Image (spheres, coloured by chain):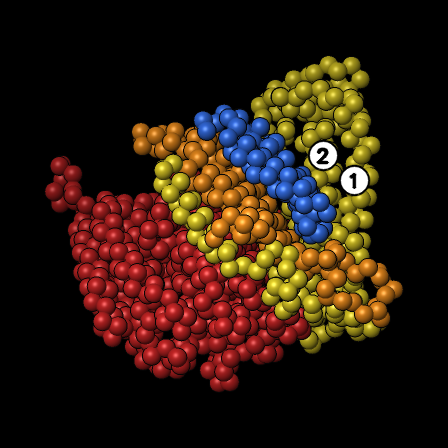
Amino acid sequence: MFWQIDLAILTLVVVTAVASLMVKDLLGAAILFGAYSFLMCLLWSIMGAVDVAFTEASVGAGVSSVFFVAAVFRTSRRTKD
Amino acid sequence: MNMAELIPALIAKYNYWIYITLMMIGLYAMIAKNNLVKKIVGMNIFQTAIILYYVSIGVKKGATIPISAGGHGAAHEAVHAADYLNPLPHVLMLTAIVVGVATLGVALALCLRIYNRYNTLEEDEILAQIRKK
Amino acid sequence: MSQQYPALLVIVPLLSAFAISIAGWVNKRLCFPIIVTALSVVVYASIGLLLTVLEKGVVIYHLGGWPPPVGIAYYVDHLNGLVLVVVASVALLNVIAAKKSIEQEFPDKAGPFYTLYILMVTGLLGIVVTGDAFNLYVLLEIAALTGYGLLAMGEERAPLSTLNYLYMGTIGACFYLLGVGYLYIVTGSLNMVDIARLLPPLYQSRAVLAAFIICMVGVWLKMAFFPLHAWLPNAYTHATSAASSLIAPLVTKVMVYVMIRLILTIFTPEFVFATLALKNVVVWLAVIAIVMGAILALAERNLKRMLTFIIVAEVGYMVGGAWLGNRAGMTGAILHIANDALMTLCVFLVVGNIVYKVKGYAFENLQGLFRKMPFTMGAFVVGAMSIIGVPPTCGFFSKWYLILGALQAGHYGFMAALIFSSLVSVVLFFRIFEICYYEPFSDHHGHDHPPEPMDEAPLTMVVPLLIVAVILILVGLYTVDIVNHIIKFAIPEGLV
Amino acid sequence: MKIIGLIITIVTGAFLVYAAADFPAWADPNSPASTYLSPYFIENSMKDTSVPNFVTSLLADYRGFDTMFETTVIFTAGLVCFILLRISGRKEPETSHYRHVLTGVTVTLKEGRKIPASEDFERIDDLWTPPDLIIKTGCRLMIPFIQLFGLYVIAHGHSSPGGGFQGGVILGASIILLAISHDLRTALERMREKVVAILCPVGVAIYAGTGTLCLLLGVNFLDYSALASVLHVDPIAARSHGIFMVEIGVGIAVMTTMIWIYNNISSAGKYNQGL
């Protein structure tokens, strides 16, 4: 376990979180949220929480993103903030 | 506290600072964002931040993943607790992740209902429509 | 069988929820008998459990056969024994009363509705009965998610107000989860009794302080304690009457129970009232909650919305009473959980009956109701008297204990708020009685308009309502017994 | 609102930072969380349940009650999505479209007329776009393997990461992939709405039923050791089998719920078109 990678991922997680909230397009926000979840999953597998990471990979990065995309598809991509 | 003590203190609990940062990002988004889906994204970030906190509790120096190395045949060998990560927070967080996706589904369903009625996802526009009536 | 009562309490409604869900797809007419049977069993088991507790003391049930703190355990003492009976009987009475309005409002989704209904009852019963801090979170989420579903089925504005409730509810539940995490990191345990045993050496730790405050804020969000109440009035007003008459009496009260459990069992009164200097701040917050709830209720021209603001004020009563930090105040708060659940049920059932017949709940819809629906309005008078606090209804006695507690603690602000809120309630309800008593203005043509004939709600709606009204008076008459035999033992000796 | 939000956030954050100062250092093997309760689970999981993955034994046995309600939460979410979105009283649209498979000619029929079911014509939606052949074929190839992997994850949860949740989500995702790559109608032919809606409570009922079976055999709820008399094995193996039974229930419930939520959200309750 390299602490540099650990720190880099921890920082990237914050970056993707902020980006998914700042981007002015809901589809983009959904995809960035997927990236956020996947980085989170990586972080947890680094920390040894393999079951949690597996669940997050399938639920958070997988199915949640699909739900988001489906909902955005059924509503609109427009967002003011 | 001088600089020499501060930096080790910062690094020793880096995970905790990140979890607080993420949680506050999520909380701010839930309070201040105008778009309903953005608020849901914020809500999910808020929830994952708490999961990050719990997973950080479970980490132990010098320990490996919480699966017995011997496999099925090694029931008689002694297992040393110090060699394995703390499995309890992991179990709790499996539950929390599942609760998170359940909440997400319900929230998106509500968003769809709102969009069908008001044809927008911006909270201020919806409130303006309600007030107009 | 009696040692399995705690398990039955949760398993019977859970399994019947699945049965109802499947029956909804196969034969819809089976749903209602199943739910009534299941809730009757629950009421029976909860009363049996309370009697066992009264006879033998605390009942502990090990789920999965693992002794705590390894496994999850149920602790049933006098406090949750009482709340269990209230939750179970409110749910049973309400489902019988709600049948007709469910058939009227959404006949094709009755199966899923009943499933959500009984799952919500499962969640609430589980919250009350569990002795594990994390288990409580999971059950909190069940009660919350089913609540969102039930509330969002209402009028056209319901989804938006429910979504706001969802945001607030999720923040609340997550704060509670975080608080449990803070307790876990310093103690390593999740069992409530075990945490309480491990905590005393750590009372000075900042993490414990943070855990307590975060848990409290989370629970306050969930119970709509002022100023965190913003979600409640809209969510409850726009819901269907069957849903709001389940959720309004129970959810906030169960959350008050959680708060009292946190104070009494996990953190112990010594820590909360002696170590922390927050007692007065919270009681003053409660004073503001009561006053603001009463004033906001006064501004409403709509019966259901007015009642939701009364709920906000009532939450203030209970939080204030619990935080007074003395025996009388705590007794008042616990007694008020039971009383307020019953009286809120009473007035919301009345609203349900009115909506069923008149199709509206604004003040102008209420004219001439005393003649039109005499039994419903009779029950409404009893419920209103109880909320105002007129003896011999039960509302008087819990208020009496609360005022006693305020006097003992020397907190005259809280006492003044209680009396102010009672006076405002008098104004609120007598205004409604007046509207209901007079006939609608006759039109200009014929002055001798024939009075409207009696048009009472169906029997299945009126009978449960009248039962609730009678219970309100009975509980009032037997208050002394309830206090001496149940609540006295629910409060630890340390609190004087 | 933005300023209020900022103030609340900063105050809460500062409070949390203040409290975090008293935490045990990160990854400290001597922190209370690592020394008080968790050694029991690590040292006794193999002896009590013969499950090498401590997370699985903890999830489904020591804290099995939590997990039962977690599955119920999932079921509740599916039900709430259904109750909120599903448009009942399915009215057939005025016009219906059929596509001749071989030539690609689209036929539009009015006033609810229908073409009798045959190989030549397939029913399509009014927003139909021709699916990409590469995606269609690629997904067709992948789906069986994804499902196999999902079953493996459920079955192998005892000794490797995974279990009912993860496997169930993967199985559900395979059907969702079918719905995305083809269309919702194709996925619904494989998994009808009624099947999904009945399998979901059945999955949770398998979990609760296993627990109730233990109750009926005379021990506490969810105490799988009682299954020993039914399965004719020793109590430790019975616990292992009990865990497996509930994992299957969890898998079924999670799979169907994911499909259920997706179907309702992607078609806004109309059950046509989809994504």
Give x and y (percent) for residue C369.
Answer: 24, 52
Q: Residue furthest right?
A: B73
- Is B125 in front, or is B43? B43
Question: In the displayed structure, would residue C37 be above or below residue C354?
Answer: below
Chain letter, colour orange: B
Q: In this rendering, does residue D168 appear at all?
A: no
Task: Give the percent coordinates (x, y) of residue B57.
Answer: 61, 57
Q: Is residue C406 visible?
A: yes
Q: Position of residue B61 (x, y in %)?
A: 69, 57
Amino acid type at circle 1 is: Ile
Q: Colour of chain C?
A: red
Q: Colour of chain A?
A: blue
**Residue at numbered disc 1:** D146
Residue B65: give x, y in percent of width and height. 74, 55
> Residue sitting at 49 percent across and 69 percent down?
C202
Q: Nearer the viewer, residue C67 or C77?
A: C67
Where residue D177 is drawn, which disc sits there?
Answer: 2
Task: Please tell me in which quadrant of the rendered image residue D261 appears.
Answer: top right
Query: Which chain is indicated by disc 2?
Result: D
- Shown in yellow, the chain is D
C-beta proximity under 8 Å, tags 1 and 2: yes
Q: Badge 2 local density, few (<14 within 10 Å), some, or many (20+)?
A: many
